[in-house]
Amino acid sequence: MQITVNRQPHTVPVPWQQETLLHVLRESFGLVGSKFGCGMAQCGACTVWLDGAPVRSCVTPVAAVGARAVTTIEGLAPSGEALHPVQRAWLAHQVPQCGYCQAGQIMAAAALLRDTPVPTDAQIDAAMAGHLCRCGTQHRVRAAIRSLAAPGAAS
């Protein structure tokens, strides 16, 4: 089985073909940015993109990926750039504390801003709902997302 991850083809070894996408990414491919949190699609730490849509990789069978492109936090930055603008905003607004949930939050925020360049607070809240952060940095998450919104963003 072949899947495309971060614009590169990868072969999923036969013993891994019955696993979740998260386990294949982390354990077979060594892409450890996406984290195992709850294992039930409730916390968001495992969020990656399938064809640009955020999904919880802890409950997504790798066999269900098919021809869809997988993007992880490691592949989020545009070609030739070290960090994606959302990653830079996260650092500028000092969002991370423990950092465990950050990859999933960044993937969700990047998808939101790609699809809705000027999100309202309600849209930000909806996009970030279910991304649990025990450190309590949600106000910094919103500030980081707002900083990337086009001028005149509604609040």
Image: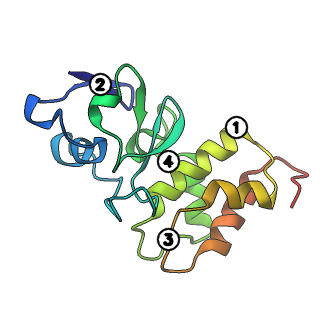
Residue bearing the label numbered 1 = 115
Camera-side residue of 91 and 104: 104
Q: How far apart are marks 3 and 1 (CA)?
A: 24 Å
Q: How many marks?
A: 4
* SS for dot 2: strand
Q: Earlier in the sequence, mark 1 or mark 4?
A: 4
- Residue farthest left in this picture: 15
Name the mark nearer the viewer: 4 or 3: 3
- The amino acid on which the numbered mark 3 sits, given as a three-letter code, is Pro
Q: Earlier in the sequence, mark 1 or mark 2?
A: 2
- The amino acid on which the numbered mark 2 sits, given as a three-letter code, is Ile
Q: Earlier in the sequence, mark 4 or mark 3?
A: 4
Assess whether mark 2 and mark 1 are in contact (beta carbons under 8 angstroms): no
Residue bearing the label numbered 2 = 3
> Whole-percent x and y of residue 145?
69, 57
Q: How far apart are marks 1 and 4 (CA)?
A: 19 Å
- Image height check: is 28 above or below 100? above
- Residue farthest bottom in this picture: 135
Name the mark nearer the viewer: 2 or 3: 2
Q: Which residue is located at x 47 percent, y 76 percent?
A: 97
Residue bearing the label numbered 3 = 96
Residue bearing the label numbered 4 = 83
- The amino acid on which the numbered mark 4 sits, given as a three-letter code, is Leu
* Callout 1 crowding tier (Cα within 10 Å): few <14, some 14–19, many ≥20: few
> Whole-percent x and y of residue 119?
78, 50
Q: Which of marks 3 and 1 is nearer the N terminus?
A: 3
